[in-house]
Image (spheres, grey):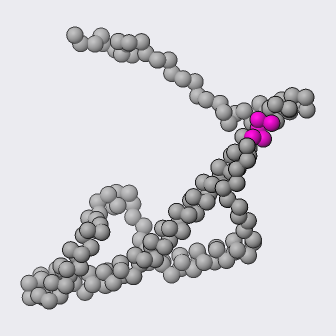
Amino acid sequence: MTQNLVDLALTDDQLAAAEAAITQLETLFAGFVSLTPQERRSLTRMGQQSKPFCDATLLAMEQNPELIPPILDLAEGKKDVLTFDQLTPLFRRMERLSERAWDTEAALGSDIMVLALGGYGALRAGGKAQGLDALCKQLSVRFARAPRKPKKAAGDNGGSNPPAT
C-alpha cells in the first residue's frame, strides 16, 4: 500500500529564496488592509457582474461633473479602479499558486498518512514478538474515539415535560 502523489524535495537555497520573495511581496504590498470579520460582512461587494456597472457609472460621472455632488470623490474612485485593475491579475496568479500550495500540502500529508498507516499495521502485526506492544498502544491513541452518547428512546425528550398531545 504505497502512494506518492508528490515527489518534491526543496533545497535550503530554494526555501531561502521563497522566504525572500514572500518578504518582498509583503514589503511591496504593505498598504494592503486587514479587515475584521464584521467589516468583511458589512462591505458592499462588487462582483464580476457589477464591475461593468461601476466602470460605466464612473465614466458617466467624469463626463457629467456638474451632476455629481462634491461629497462623491471621483478622483479617489478612479484611483481605486486603476489599482483594482492592476492588482486583479496578480491576485488571480497568487490564488492559483496558493491553491497549488494547499493541494501540495494535502497530497504530501496524504502520502505521509498512507505510509504511516501501513507502517502502523506492520508494527502491530509483527511488533508483539519484537517488544513493541507499548509503542503500538501509544500509537493507537490516534484511533481512539470519544464515547458515544446513548441514543434516546423513541418519545424520550430528555426528561423534560411530556410531549404535547
Q: Is residue 76 visible?
A: no
> How far across and how far down the image is residue 56, in percent?
19, 80
Image position of 124 (left or right of 85): right
> How far across and how far down the image is residue 80, in percent?
31, 80
Q: Is residue 62 visible?
A: yes
The correct choice, above or below, for 112 with respect to 6 in the image is above
- Labels in figure, total: 0
Q: Residue furthest left?
A: 67
Residue visible at 76% across and 35% down in the picture? 121
Q: Residue furthest right?
A: 130
| Rendered image quadrant of residue 1 | top right
Residue visible at 43% across and 15% down in the picture? 152
> Dominant secondary structure of the magenta stretch?
helix
Image position of 81 (left or right of 68): right
The correct choice, above or below, for 42 with respect to 165 in the image is below
> How far across and how far down the image is residue 113, in percent?
68, 46
As for residue 119 lying within the magenta part, the answer is yes
| Rendered image quadrant of residue 8 | bottom right
Residue visible at 73% across and 65% down in the picture? 9
> How far across and how far down the image is residue 26, in percent?
53, 76
| Rendered image quadrant of residue 147 | top right
Q: Which residues are magenta?
A: 118-122
Residue visible at 51% across and 81% down in the picture? 28
For the C terminus, give its image quadrant. Answer: top left
In-front residue for pair 148/9: 9
As for residue 12 lying within the magenta part, the answer is no
In-front residue for pair 133/53: 53
Image position of 3 (left or right of 136): left
The correct choice, above or below, for 58 with respect to 2 in the image is below
